[in-house]
Each structure stands twice: as structure tokens, then as C-alpha cells.
Amino acid sequence: MAETQRFSLTEVLDSFRTCLTDQGDILLEHYLNGWKGLIKFMNSLGSVFSFISKDAVGKIQIMENYRIGESSQQYLTLQSMVKYEMENKLVDLVQRSENWDSGCRTILRLHRVLRWLQLFLEKLQIASEDSKTSVLCTEAYNDSLACHHTWIVRKAATVAFYALPTRVAFFEAMNMGTTEEAVAKLGVALPFLSKVFDITEELYRQHNLLDLP
Ligand code: 1PZ
């Protein structure tokens, strides 16, 4: 059993460190690996999250197809992807049409979730022993992602959050050691998550891509 449980959120969060180059570029391979790990982690929390997982997997798949497709060289970094798709008019800017699955809009959906993750992990880090993970998660969601989701998705997400385990059990599932160790590791990982978020936000802001349909 120990073998199949080797998963650790530390390694997953590390992908968001290794995706950053010295030049401030974001390497899509590592960025997407981070997401794959997060999805794996979410799946381990129970089947109530499978509708979220399904959507996330679909989005990762879209990106993986670009990364092995004929323009794969353009999809090495987030920056090269934005440049390529914008220069070649491969992004639906006003309404979803033939480029409904552009890399830019697909990553934007994940980028918004990253904000939720950042807020949620920050809350988890400083919360008291007895705080309810579902409450922290819902607060983080309402402060970030909720405004981008339809009513039905908001309802479903909020219901799913109730299934989240206690803070202690959650840390256990993360496999980051004792609660104290987990808190310390989050302290190391979170600044990288923020940096990835900020770089993406700024890149998208510069290109006016933050509201892609
Ligand atoms: C540990 C608890 C997990 C909570 C995950 C928090 C995110 C809630 C997201 C709810 C998404 C519900 C299903 C799909 C919604 C889609 O409509 C949206 C917009 O995409 P579009 O319709 O425009 O194509 N999809 C998203 O917002 C992306 C969702 C990806 C979720 C990845 C979760 C990673 C989990 C991390 C767990 C630590």
C-alpha cells in the first residue's frame, strides 16, 4: 500500500517552481505536470470531485495535444504560446468559435484555478487545528473562481467542498509529513505558486486576454 501512496503534494508543488526559468518564462511541460499531480491528488479525495477532475483532464489533454502537435516548438513556454497563437490569430477573442480550444483560453481557465489554490493553501497554512477545510475552501472559491463559473457549477462545487476531510486528514492525504512540516513546506512552495500566477496574470493583461470567452 505504501508504494501506491507515494504521492506527495510537495513534489507536485515543486513543478510550479521548476516551471519557472531564470528569464521568467513558464515551461509548459512542468506547469502541466503540476496540474496532473493536483488532479491525481484531488481524485484521491473521493469521487465527488470527479466532475471537476473530468473538466480539468479535458483541458490538460487539449494542451498535451498542442505539445505533441506539428507546432509543438511554439508550446514550450507560456510566453511562446501566447505569441504564436496571437500572431497567427488562433485565439477567439470575443466569442467562442472555431478556436474555442486555444491554448490561451485553456490555460486561462487553469490560471484562474491557481488563484483559488493559492488562497486555499494560504488559508490552510494559517488555520487553527479545528478549522473546517470545507469552509476555507468555499471562502477561497468565493473570493476567486466563483465569479467565473455558472450558477450550476457554483452549486455543484460548493456541495463537493462539503466532502473535504478535516485539516489534519487533509494534510495526511497531502503526504507532506506532520502538520508542522506541511505548514513549513507550504511556506516554501507558496511563493513560487504566487510567482507563476503573477507572471501569467501580467502576460495575459498585457495581451488583453484575461476575459477570453
Ligand atoms: C480539493 C478540492 C478541489 C477543489 C477544486 C476547486 C476548483 C473548483 C472548480 C469547479 C469546476 C467544475 C467543473 C467545470 C467547470 C468549467 O465550466 C470551468 C470553466 O471552463 P469552461 O466551461 O469555460 O471550459 N472549468 C474550470 O474552471 C477549470 C477547473 C479545473 C479544476 C482543476 C482542479 C485541480 C484541483 C486541485 C486540488 C488541490
Image (spheres, grey):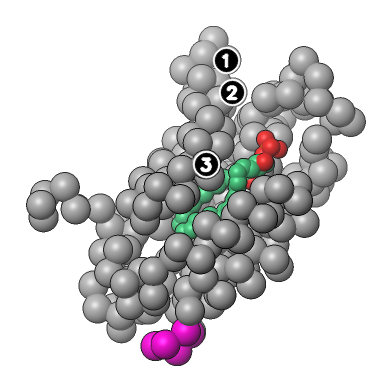
Residue 74: which disc? Answer: 2
Give the residue at mark 3.
51
Queried whether the magenta region covers residue 125, the answer comes back as no
Relative to 184, is 21 on the left or the right? right
> 10 Å neighbourhood of mark 2: few (<14), some, or many (≥20)?
some
Relative to 145, is 125 on the left or the right? left
User: Given the image, on which type of amino acid does mark 2 rest?
Assistant: Gln
Any atom of ligand 1 within 8 Å of the CB at mark 2? Answer: no
Write the residue at 77% across / 15% down: 98
User: Would you place residue 82 above or below residue 44 in this image?
Assistant: above
Q: Secondary structure at mark 3?
A: helix
Residue 153: which disc? Answer: none
Distance CA(mark 2)–CA(mark 3): 31 Å
Quick one: which residue is furthest to the right in this view?
A: 94
Give the residue at mark 1.
71
Q: Quadrant of residue 212?
A: top right
Q: Which region is colored magenta?
A: 127-131
Along the polypeptide, which appears first: circle 2 or circle 3?
3
> 10 Å neighbourhood of mark 3: few (<14), some, or many (≥20)?
some
Predominant SS of the magenta segment: loop
Q: Nearer the viewer, residue 155 or 187?
A: 155
Q: Are marks 2 and 1 in contact (CB under 8 Å)?
A: yes
Q: Position of residue 33 (x, y in %)?
A: 41, 41
